Amino acid sequence: MQANESTIRVVSKAPGKLVVLGEYAVLNGAPALVLAVDRYCCATIGPSEDGSCHFVSMTNTEEAVDFSADMRSGFAVVDEVLQSLPNAGIWQGMLDSRELFAATMKLGLGSSAAALTAWAGAWAVFSGRERLGADSRTLEMLIGLHQAIQSGTGSGVDVAASLFGGVIRFQLNENSLPEVSTVQLPKGVGFAGIFARSAALTPDFLARYEAWCAAKTEEAVALQAVLAEIAQNGICAASEDDAQGFLEAITEYGRCLEYLGVCIGAHIVTPKHRELMKTAERLGIAYKVSGAGGGDFGLAFSADAAALDSFKRAVDAECDVFEFGIDLSGLIVETASE
């Protein structure tokens, strides 16, 4: 559909993510398990009402910019998409990522990946191109754009969650191309996100991890193999509806992430998350940090709803408990006549 004639407004949304298994090791070809959650980045694009382009970014602050069609906006997500999918017209647009932020910081839900996915989906339609499908071609394109704004880092697991939605298994194959398949959490297993009220230091931690891998190759390969095996076992357990095996993998992977932090000289598991792990163990809850660590979210899983409720009450005073739902749709793009 051609959508840049003056009467079409395009709106889109893409979900955030929480990594369940596979952090760090996914960069080296291990499988990862990731949830798309019901917190969204929303994009809106329509025709400009004057001779300039206008863009508004809404995160924990609001920023607005006006510029001519032959200039860059200064927002990396927008500019990378427009460079990849050029269009000569003038437009006005907004990216609203407020659901992926706390009052003063990112929540660690993959806000940049969700923003990129939402904006690219809306822009493709507005500029008269085919809709972006939930397929390997689109995923590879979006991961490339995301890496361009992230200095070449990242596996793309967060982009996959934003594009596909649901619970997915993500893995980079021998050619470093992403492969995605759908998984289900074991029946009866509930979860909650626990925000430790501090932001993660993902770029710094990934740099430390890469430096450690280069300096301690043999040790790194050995630990990567352990992490990959645990992640694979947990994903298989989920696929086979084996709640106990899945929960054991969560706990085991969390402990290995703590050891990895020691290896790379970083608090992947912060003192606060260490306290949460102890509380979880006492109450029979499977708990681990989610993502690169160093702050933001931990995930608590249990097949015992009462025990999970007890854990949430126990940690609520010092952390923020998020009752996430799983987003099943991924990227959604709609058009409306003005």
Image: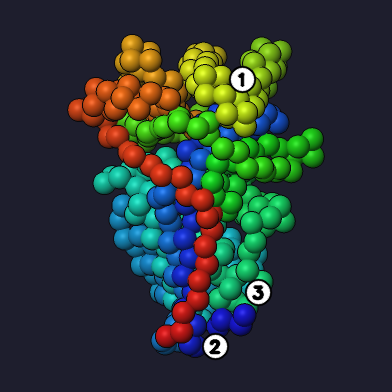
Q: Residue furthest right?
A: 175
Few, some or many residues within 10 Å of mark 3 (<14, 14–19, 20+) = some
Towards the viewer: 328 or 318? 328
At 50% from the left and 45% from the top, the residue drawn is 36
**Left or right position of 183 against 334:** right
> Residue 33, percent across and down?
58, 34
User: Disc 2 or 1, which lies upstream in sequence?
Assistant: 2
Mark 2 or 1: the one toward you: 1
Query: In x, y percent, where is residue 294?
Result: 42, 27
Say what amino acid the circle numbered 1 marks.
Ile
Kindly report the distance in space between the C-alpha atoms of the residues bearing marks 2 and 3.
Answer: 13 Å
- Which labelled disc corresponds to residue 129? 3
Q: Identify the coloring.
A: rainbow
Is residue 59 depicted above or below 183 in this figure? below
Instruction: Kindly identify which residue carries mark 2.
Output: 5
Disc 3 marks which amino acid?
Answer: Arg
Q: Amino acid at mark 2?
A: Glu
* Residue 72 % position (x, y): 52, 68
Q: Which residue is mark 1?
A: 230
Please provide percent x and percent y for residue 148. Answer: 61, 51
**Which residue corresponds to the image point at 63% horizontal and 69% vertical from the top-left?**
131
SS for dot 1: helix
Q: How far apart, in angstroms, are the residues tagged by discs 1 and 3?
A: 42 Å
Circle nearer the N terminus (2, 3): 2
Which label's residue is closer to the chain start, 1 or 3? 3
| Residue most extreme to the left | 317
Residue 197 seen anywhere in this rendered image of the structure:
no
- Frontmost residue, 307 versus 270: 307
In the picture, the quarter occupied by the N terminus is bottom right
Q: Are there few (<14), some (14-19), or many (20+) residues within 10 Å of tag 2?
A: few
- Look at 42% across and 49% down and name the residue there: 38
Q: CA distance from mark 2 to mark 1?
A: 53 Å
